Image: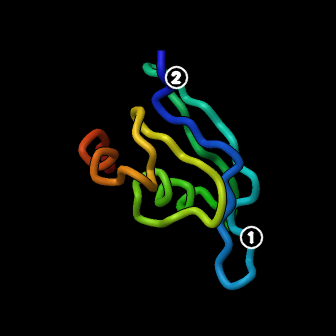
Amino acid sequence: MTAAVCVQNVHKVYNNAHVVNDLSLMIEPGESFGLLGPNGAGKSTTIRMLTTLTKPSEGHLVVAGHDVQQNPIDVRRQIGVV
């Protein structure tokens, strides 16, 4: 079975500031998952990358079997964000 979300070695850098540094995670279908952390930990940036609103500086993200960078429209068709 394919993971619902797969994140491998993702980095995001804004103006030489490392906002997300080497994030890797896998969320299986039906699994509940939460992002917890202090202000500035990269939670919102991670969600923005997963929802195709921001490109990672480095790494690979797959949502619902679709590569976030190569198939952003397919990702958007599969997700809902509140």
> Looking at the image, which residue sits at the far bottom?
15
Amino acid on which disc 1 is placed: His
Give the colour scheme of this rendering. Answer: rainbow
Of residues 69 and 78, the one nearer the viewer is 69
Residue 63, image x, y percentages: 44, 39
Tell me: residue 14, above or below residue 55: below
Labels in figure, total: 2
- Picture residue at 29% right of the left edge, 45% below the top: 74
**Which residue is at a point 59% across and 45% down the rendered structure image?**
35
The image quadrant that residue 12 belongs to is: bottom right
Q: Quadrant of residue 65?
A: top left
The residue pinned by badge 2 equals 28
Residue nearest the observer in this picture, 38 or 74: 74
Horizontal and vertical percent position of residue 15: 68, 85
Real-space CA distance between mark 1 and mark 2, rounded to the nearest whole angstrom = 27 Å
Q: Earlier in the sequence, mark 1 or mark 2?
A: 1
In this figure, which residue is indicated by the disc labeled 1? 18
Is residue 78 toward the left or the right of residue 70 in the image? left
For label 2, the crowd category at 10 Å Cα-Cα, with few meaning under 14, some 14 to 19 and many 20 or more, is some
In the image, residue 80 above or below residue 15 = above
Residue depicted at 52% across the width and 22% down the height: 28
Q: Which residue is painted at 36% across and 50% down in the image?
A: 71
In the displayed image of the protein, which residue is found farthest to the front?
A: 70
Judge whether 28 appears above or below 21 on screen.
above
Q: Amino acid at mark 2?
A: Glu
Please provide percent x and percent y for residue 16.
74, 82
Numbered badge on residue 66: none
Dot 1 falls on a residue whose secondary structure is strand
Query: In the image, is residue 63 above or below residue 50?
Result: above
Q: Quadrant of residue 56?
A: bottom right
Location of residue 34 in the rendering, given as x and y in whole percent from the top left corner: 56, 38
Mark 1: give few (<14), some (14-19) or many (20+) Cα within 10 Å. some
